[in-house]
Amino acid sequence: MKALIRFVLFSMILAIAACETPIPRRDFPEMTFTHLPSISLDVATIDVVQLFDPPLKPPHVEHEMPIQPHMAVSRWVSDRLKPTGSSGHAKVTIRDASVIEERLKSVGGLRGAFTTEQSERYVGKIEVEIEAVGGKGLRAASAVARTQRSRTIAEDASLRQRESFWFELTERMMQDFDRTFEAQIRQHLTAFLK
């Protein structure tokens, strides 16, 4: 009798566990920047230093995004900046690559019940600095780029829609970053451009 009860309980647990289907993550395209012309710098090496450490807790959401902004910035550096010199060094420092979720106030009442409202605002920020030093430390130059972009999302957005939204947010942040950082490099690191 005990064996029958154990069998029934075990079967029920298996049946309940089998009912839960994991939500498959959507595959997103790889975010690359090789389609853009490279920026040749008269240095022997380029290093990336990440000072921004994702907190992995609310209100930060960058760790939940399909492509995290700090990873996209690192990819941008490897795809666009090319060391072409025989001496010297450049250091790219990622100071901020955060995305913060802000809850928005809902209308409420009868009007709110019949309206699909924007429930969250996501504010993304990127701040990156490049410092270049020529051979024997004779020349030095630096440039900083700061970008910020925000978007809101509807309260009824599914997980897939939210992931697509986050991907697009990162993509747009990186477009802004690309324009700003390249302009800053061309303005402030002219002695290092080849």
Image (spheres, grey):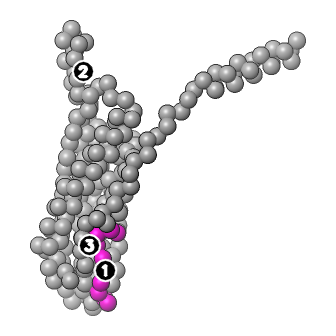
* Above or below for 55 versus 118: below
Say what secondary structure mark 2 lies in.
loop
Q: Is residue 29 visible?
A: yes
Q: Is residue 51 visible?
A: no
Which residue is farthest left? 187
Mark 2 residue crowding within 10 angstroms, few (<14) / some (14–19) / many (20+): some
Mark 1 residue crowding within 10 angstroms, few (<14) / some (14–19) / many (20+): many
- Label 1, label 3: how far apart the Cα atoms are: 10 Å
Boundaries of the magenta span: 77-89
**Residue sitting at 23 percent across and 13 percent down?**
114
Q: In this rendering, would 9 be left or right of 38?
A: right
Judged by depth in the image, the label closer to the viewer, 2 or 3, is: 3
What label does residue 116 carry, if any? 2
The amino acid type, in three-letter code, at marker 2 is Thr
- Label 1, label 2: how far apart the Cα atoms are: 51 Å
The amino acid type, in three-letter code, at marker 3 is Ser
Say what secondary structure mark 3 lies in.
loop
**Marks 1 and 3, the one that precedes in the sequence:** 3
What label does residue 143 carry, if any? none
**Residue beneath disc 1:** 83
Which residue is farthest top? 110
**Residue sitting at 75 percent across and 22 percent down?**
10
**Residue beneath disc 3:** 38
